Image (cartoon, grey):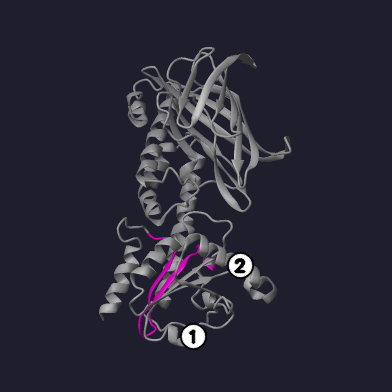
Amino acid sequence: MHTLLLLSALVADPGIESLTYQGELSQVERGQQTAVVKEFTAECFLSEQAGAVNATTLIQESTSRLPWAELVTWQSSVNTTDLAPAFGYRHMEKLYAVTGMFPLLASPEPLQKGLEWKSGPGSFEVVGEEMVGDVKCWVVESVTGPARKHQIFVQQDRPVVERLKQTVFMGQGDRFELTLQRTKSEVLPAESATKTLNAMLHLQAMKESLERDPYDRTADITPQSTAVAQEQIEELMASVKGTRFENYVASISRDLGNRAQREMEVSELRDKFVGQPAPSFTLTQLGGEPVPAEDLAGKVVVLHFWTYQEKPLEQPYGQIGYLDFLATRFRDKPVTVLGVAVDNRLGTPESRTAVVRSIKRLTSFMKTGYEVTLDTRNALNQFGNPTRLGAELPLWVILDQSGTVVHYHSGYYEIDNQRGLKELDELIADLLEK
């Protein structure tokens, strides 16, 4: 049964227990732990129904945070496919979602010494029992990949993790150790439990409506998801009032407000440029020569301002794969697609070589065919530079055959399964028919 339905069935008897965990992430070098590089707190709300234990987990972290939609997760002890709680850690300039094997450990049958089972890529074995504080626990050893060995201490009377020691790898085989310990537990009073259950139901309904990609938990909240959340935020704030989710939802509300303000300012910037002749700008080819004016004259021009760095490389890679698909589709038409690399190192010839080398490695890896140029003369600023408003690259600008700006968009597009960047595809096709 779906976790949301299980929770719904509990409304008449909402016995809920709150567990608090303290977690630390340490990097391991030459077999020895170094200093702790990340600390976080997790509060889990447990309920039981029809022999299953259900858990709602809220992660609290202050640095390198994951998008707010990923800080709350739902699990059931009878479902091994539920998303585990995760926290963010930035390593080698890349944000990782580090998942923890808690607060529940699903197994095919009740734990006992000698029990072995497999789940996905992982193998599990109950190797013994041990007291953790005053709690009797089963000691479960797990292997989820090469050198990925973990110890999970599970309460003997229920499938709840008491302590955890987990191996994590990031970057190019850099090893970390995640340790976790339950530090507190309390049964919520009936009134508080009822409010908490209502809050969890509303939170889960909103998260499901966002349709997040479960395989890309570091992805930013999309404009489409932002719009969905804005429609629900007032009702959600009312539902969490007086619960331990109140501060979390208040942070969501602040983020949505900031995004709305930023979108309004970017919209004003868009209105300033669209319908007007493009400002004077110059782009530089990777070899150092300016892009010839005849490459742009009388053509539909697509400008894609982005970092074009090979590292850190994170999905969706500036959507350059979809842009390349678009460029290929119109390669026999009077259409010029130009990537524009934006990088502070372009300001000096000494560091420019490293930028060009990085661009070439990226385009080779991604197998892109359109030309990537350098913004050495502040072309991004000529087009308003929405990053000054807190918006993120890429910036997409389309000029028609007369050099007029007809499209201006900051951020990512929704992708059509058949046509990729459908909005741009349709716009270019319309311009070519004129």
Q: Horizontal and vertical percent for residue 258?
A: 48, 57
> Which image quadrant: the N terminus?
top left
The part of the chain drawn in magenta is 388-413
Foreground residue among 242 and 105: 105
| Nearest to N terminus: mark 2 or mark 1 | 1
Q: Residue at x 49, y 51 (%)?
A: 254
Discs 2/1, front: 2
The verdict on residue 402 being magenta is: yes
Identify the residue under disc 1.
292
Which element type, helix, strand or loop, lies under badge 2? helix
Foreground residue among 118 and 5: 118
Q: Which mark is residue 357?
A: 2
Foreground residue among 157 and 41: 157
Q: Is residue 199 above or below residue 317?
A: above
> Hey, what amino acid is under mark 1?
Pro
> Hey, what amino acid is under mark 2?
Arg
Asked where in the image residue 133 lies, by quadrant, the reply is top right
Q: Horizontal and vertical percent for residue 384?
A: 50, 74
Left or right of residue 7, residue 126 in this image: right
Q: Residue at x 39, y 82 (%)?
A: 276
> Which image quadrant: the C terminus?
bottom left
- Within 10 angstroms of label 2, few (less than 14), some, or many (20 or more) residues? few
Which element type, helix, strand or loop, lies under badge 1? loop
Distance, label 2 to label 1, CA atoms, is 22 Å
